[in-house]
Image (cartoon, coloured by chain):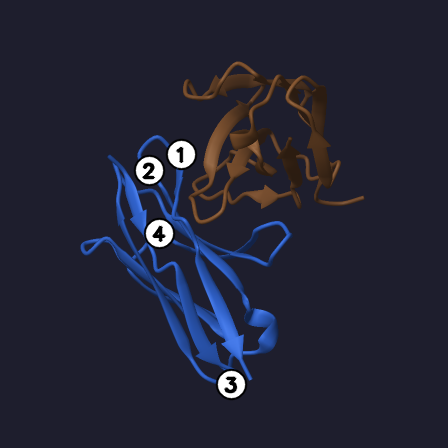
Amino acid sequence: ETGVTQTPRHLVMGMTNKKSLKCEQHLGHNAMYWYKQSAKKPLELMFVYSLEERVENNSVPSRFSPECPNSSHLFLHLHTLQPEDSALYLCASSQETGEYYGYTFGSGTRLTVV
Amino acid sequence: GQNIDQPTEMTATEGAIVQINCTYQTSGFNGLFWYQQHAGEAPTFLSYNVLDGLEEKGRFSSFLSRSKGYSYLLLKELQMKDSASYLCAVRDSNYQLIWGAGTKLIIKP
């Protein structure tokens, strides 16, 4: 496999459920990101793992918790979510060397909280 | 605060030319990106500008004016497959990407 792979593609969960989103990159990149994409809004950066160091966005509720066991894998653990958390969750990776680095995105997980 | 502005939606005709504008106000500047995102798919990289001027890549070109905080993406010879959202993003002084909300481009036959 190549690129950035996200599973599952679609997820419907109740507010009391616990689920996890998975992201895997096969590009040898050293940084990984979680983004939330809601309709007609800019991409919202949630979490960054860069050179094995976690950079957290302080505005992310604690019901979202990331895990990065190695440079190729990234998880987003979800628990007691709210309906307003329904969105497309995108994972991305990049190689942080030199002046230029672009992001490679996965296809996302479409999350619906009921 | 930091802000990226781009039109919400644009419509164009197959075979024509369309220009999608992006204006930005950010804390520093370390490059501007354009991404294309088809519905239900991943955003994919289109172009990167860090110096003023025009970068051409096939049917797509991207222009940057740092003094005006302005960029545009120019799409020529439009095809139906160009129907997508186009995202503008600026890398600030902390090397964080600041994103616009995207421009949905609708191509009509």
Labelled disc at residue B92: 2
* Residue of label 3: B15
Which callout, 1 or 4, points at the residue further toward the start of the chain?
Answer: 4
Describe residue B53's horizontal placement relative to residue A54 as left or right. left
Q: Name the image quarter holding residue B84.
A: bottom right
- Quadrant of the frame with the N terminus of chain A: top right
Q: Where is residue A85 in the image (x, y as percent from the top left)?
A: 55, 30
Mark 4 belongs to chain:
B
Amino acid on which disc 1 is placed:
Gln
Callout 3: 10 Å neighbours few (<14), some, many (20+)?
some
Callout 2: 10 Å neighbours few (<14), some, many (20+)?
some
* Residue of label 1: B96
Amino acid on which disc 2 is placed:
Asp
Cα separation, mark 3 vs mark 2, equals 36 Å
SS class, disc 1: loop
Describe residue B108's horizontal placement relative to residue A6 as left or right. left
Q: Position of residue B34 (x, y in %)?
A: 45, 55
Q: Is any atom of residue A94 visible in this view?
A: no
Give whichever of B34, A14 is nearer the camera.
A14
Cα separation, mark 2 vs mark 1, equals 6 Å
Residue reaching furthest left? B67
Q: Where is residue A46 in the image (x, y as percent from the top left)?
A: 50, 27
Q: Nearer the viewer, mark 1 or mark 4?
A: 1
Cα separation, mark 3 vs mark 4, equals 29 Å
Callout 1: 10 Å neighbours few (<14), some, many (20+)?
few
Labelled disc at residue B50: 4
In this rendering, do the residues under marks 1 and 4 share a single chain? yes
In this rendering, do the residues under marks 2 and 4 share a single chain? yes
In this rendering, do the residues under marks 3 and 2 share a single chain? yes
Please give the name of the residue rendered at 31% of the width and 55% of the height, measured from the top-left corner.
Answer: B51
Which callout, 2 or 4, points at the residue further toward the start of the chain?
Answer: 4
